[in-house]
Structures are given as structure tokens and as C-alpha cells.
Amino acid sequence: MNEFIHLNLYANQESTSVINADGVVIDTFSRRIKCTTSDGPLLKAFADAFDRTMPLAGIVDELAEYGADQLQNFYSVLKRVYQDAALSIEYHDGDVIGGRFVPMSAMPLIVDVAGYSGRIQLARFAAFHKMGTTLVLEAPIANARFELYDRNTISTITSWMAASSSRVENSLLARLLILTGLAVVVDESAASAQNELNEPDGWTSHEMFFQFRSRHGFHTNPSGGLFYGAGRRDPLPANRPRLDCDIRIPLPAPTHITSDSLESVVSRRVSTRKFSQQQPSLAQLGELFWRTMRQTEALSMTVKDQSGIDHVFPLKRRPVPSGGAVHEIDAYILANVGGELPAGLWRYDDEYHEMVHVADLGEDSQIVSYHAQRSAALSETPYMLVLFSARFDRMMWKYTAMPFAAILKHVGVLYEIFYLVATDMGLGVCGLGNGESRAFSRMIGTHPAVETTVGEMLIGIPMHSSS
């Protein structure tokens, strides 16, 4: 095989280079890197590297003829660009571009790379996935992902993935995978010769990717309030349409609220798992939702898409905070025991302070209740549940890379305010750590990727003991 690499300034970070008689200036995503020199061989080396006129190994060999100082200056600049995650590595096998290593964080200096001979295995949790039309190999905390363009390169890596470990001979591709953290060296017994991750066994693949792709430090993906939805699809309304066919029960608005001190409420807060069979009254539910999730203000913002066209993004305010005033989470009540609120699934309409009937009890409500019962370690079906459900595209229209992480933070905010207000009112709640989402989506008639539960809690009138 005739394997070699080219370097690319990573275009997605809008990196630029200027090479002239005075030296080299490179603008990375985070800083300007300068190398002031009039040395012809060094300037030619940079020009050849960034214009990809010859393989990197050839550039290094040519520059080495002019002395170690020249190489040192060349490496010094490249090292800083690698540290800024602004260089990608284009892997070639003969005339074929096998793929491109795209930085996900600061990378080590990779220059005159020799092929690797020995045993390797792919990094823990390494996985293929599609990014647009491109197949990508990625691992949660590797410092690069590998975008694959060639069938033979894909076949080589899949054969390595299929085995617990693989022996390779003089493979530049294997060396690049090792240097970028997508593969590790193993000994002859297939045991890892280095544990570069050193992660606890408790991590699972989806949790590793979620943690390290939704926060900065381990990826270079676009992230934040970028409004990528603008111009691609209409934003979801802040409030749902009010239909004539809806079965609605108005909730009383409290006329006077007496409250203990915050310190008193916080000190008395407990998770309650034993409840009276008597359901909370409409007045109690009305006060609970009034103090936690009612809409206090309707507002909007105007966003321009890439074509300069304006789009109105409807927002609102509630007593609880929400990133960007989006408030993507709504509350449902699943009443398994009828009372003033009849048995069934009800959604709280925060605009009108009403409960809207969504579904009758049935097989799906039994599934949702059973999982809540197991999560709370109860011996019987819970009488009443609060189900927090997210309309995901309310967040995804604005935020990129981090919307689901923000949604879960919002769930935590809702848990705490429900605990505090319920405690202040003499009600009991118990936040649950897990629940069933597929059956809930069937109950509301929506695809789970459009809307489903992201949190749930028991609620009711406490019996004598709490835990």
C-alpha cells in the first residue's frame, strides 16, 4: 500500500493562512498564530503543507535537509494549530482518498507518521454512524472522528471492529487511529496495553456520547443557540391550539396564597411514596399548577435565516425558568383513581389554566403506571402521576448539539419547584428516575421523536409516613 497524509486547515472553523515573504499567519477558531520568517525552505514547507502539493512525509524529508532548526520551527507552528483543533488529516491510499480525520478536540502533533505493526483494537464505544451522506467512525472522547470516503477503507476498519483485536503490518491507517484515540494498542493476549480512557465500568455508549457531545471540550461540532431551524421548518407554537372538541375542566385560580418560609419548606421536603386514595382536589391542583407552570406572559422574537428572511419564534414565561423562554415541557396528569378530576390522561393548559382530556385509561396507561410503580418500588399502582413531556423541536429549532441536555436541566427545575410548592401546600410528591415513553406517545397520538415523556413524579395526599 502507498499510504500517505495531507493536512487541511479545518474549513468548518473558517481557518485561514497567509504565507508571504514576511512569514506565516494562521487564523484558527480561537487565535492568530504567527511565524515571522523570511527563510525560503520553511515558507515553501508551509505552502506545500497547506496547499497539499505533496504528502506531508515528503515535505518533512525535504525540509530536514536544511537542518533540525527548520524542522523545529515547522513543528512548533503545526503543534499550535493542532492544539486549536484547526487541522484535519486527509488519509490517502494510493490515488484514493480513504477518509479524513476531523478534529473533535486538541490533537497531538501528527507529522511524519510511520506505519504501525502489532495488535490493535478500536476504542471502547467506537461506532459508525451517518453524518449526512458520509459514514463516520467516532468514539466519545477520541480527539478526532474519521469520515470515510472509500469502500476498501471502510472494509478494513469493519474487519478490525469485528474482531476483539487485530494484527496489522506497517499500517499507516492503524497508526492514525491510535494517535487520534479511535484505536488502542493491545498485547498478544488481546489485553489493552494502555487504558487511555481510564473510565469507570458504569459508562454505557449512549451516556458517553451524550455527555461528551452536549458539552464543550470533546467536540468541535456547532453548538448553542444557532437557530438552524429558521428557514428549514416553522417553529412550533408556544401554545397548542384550543379545539372546540376538547373536553376541558377549568382549574380554580388561588385567591390568597399563604406560604411558609423557604427555609422551612426546604427542610421539610421529602419524597412521599404512601398516599391516601383520595385524589387531590381541583382547587389543590389549580394552586399547584398556578404556582409552578401557568403562563404569565406571551412574547416572541424575530430570527433571520441564512437568506435574511425573518421568522417569528413564539415564546412565553412561567414561574419556572427555561432556556431562552422556550418552555418546551408540558405537564400531564395520569389519574388512575377518579375524583374531582375524572380518571384518565389530562394535559395542563398553562395559557387558560385548565385541564384538557387527552385519553381514557387503557392498556397504555397501565404500561406507563407499571413502570412508574417499579421505579418508585411500590407494591401497587400509583393513584396519580405527573408526567412531564417535551415537544422537542421547540428547543431543537433554536439550539444545536445541546437541546436535549437543556431539556433534562429543565426537568430538574420542574422537579424541585413541584417538591417545594407541594410541600408548602401539604401535598406529597416523589420524583422518579425513569419511566416509559413509547406507551405515553401512543396515548397522545404523537411520534416519540416529536413529543414524549422526559420525567415523571408521584403526586397525592400523603398518608402518615414519608421517606
Image: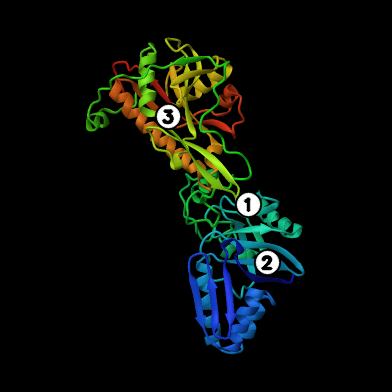
Q: CA distance from mark 3 to mark 1?
A: 33 Å
Image spot of residue 311 (x, y percent): 57, 43
For the question of whether residue 331 can be seen, the reply is yes
Q: Which residue is tagged 2?
A: 91
Label 2, secondary structure: give it. Answer: strand
Image spot of residue 210 (x, y percent): 52, 46
- The amino acid marked with disc number 2 is Tyr
Q: Is residue 47 above or below residue 443?
A: below
In-front residue for pair 162/300? 300
In-front residue for pair 391/298? 298
- The amino acid marked with disc number 3 is Gln
- The amino acid marked with disc number 1 is Ser
Q: Which residue is tagged 1?
A: 307
Badge count: 3
Image spot of residue 419 (x, y percent): 34, 28
**Tag 3–tag 1 contact (CB < 8 Å):** no
Earlier sequence position, callout 3 versus callout 1: 3
